[in-house]
Image (cartoon, rainbow, N blue to C red):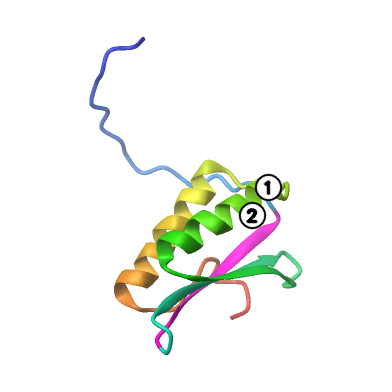
Amino acid sequence: MKAWQLQNVDNTEYIPDTSGVYVLIYWQNKTNTARLDIMSDNHEPIQSFAGTANNVRKHAIRFLSDNGYNVSLEHASYIGLELEKADNMHIDYVQDAEKPQ
């Protein structure tokens, strides 16, 4: 096993995966919950989840994994980060700016 070390990191580019999906993330003020819509590249809805950001994150990632979508660890962690941001800031968030809202 390699000995522990601190690695300082610099900027690195996002490496897209081949999942063929993007997500729309919303904060729903009326119900005080997070919502995540999984969308196909051709803008068709695949599945939606609503609840606490933490539970939405877990259900969405399990759904993507269980249904054969090739979501990278980087993509999955980014989805979690943005769900948490929407939850903390109570804002709507669209994962990919060129996708329709």
Determine whether label 1 and label 2 are within 8 Å by CB. Answer: yes
Which secondary structure, mark 2?
helix
Q: Depth check: give the residue in front, 2 or 64.
A: 64
Q: Which residues are magenta?
A: 20-29
* Helix, strand or loop at mark 1: helix
The numbered mark at residue 36 is none
Answer whether residue 100 is visible to the viewer in this image. yes
Q: Position of residue 38 (x, y in %)?
A: 63, 66
Kindly indicate the quadrant of the structure image that contains residue 53.
bottom left
Residue where numbered disc 2 is placed: 63
| Amino acid on which disc 1 is placed | Asp
Q: Residue at 35% across / 66% down in the picture?
A: 85
Residue at coordinates 42% horizontally, 68% vertically from top-left?
52
Quadrant of the rendering where the N terminus is positioned = top left
- Disc 1 crowd rating (10 Å Cα; few below 14, some 14-19, many 20+) is few
Mark 1 and mark 2: span between their CA atoms?
5 Å
The image shows residue 29, relative to residue 16, as above or below, that is: below
| Mark 2 residue crowding within 10 angstroms, few (<14) / some (14–19) / many (20+) | some
Asked whether residue 64 is drawn in magenta, I would say: no
Q: Residue at x 53, y 50 (%)?
A: 75
Q: Is residue 11 left or right of residue 18?
A: left
Report the magenta stretch's main SS.
strand
Name the spot of residue 21 as percent of width and height, x first.
67, 59
Q: Position of residue 22 (x, y in %)?
A: 62, 62
Residue 66 marker: 1
Q: Residue furthest left?
A: 6
Give the answer, above or below, for where 58 lies relative to 94.
above
Q: Amino acid at mark 2?
A: Phe
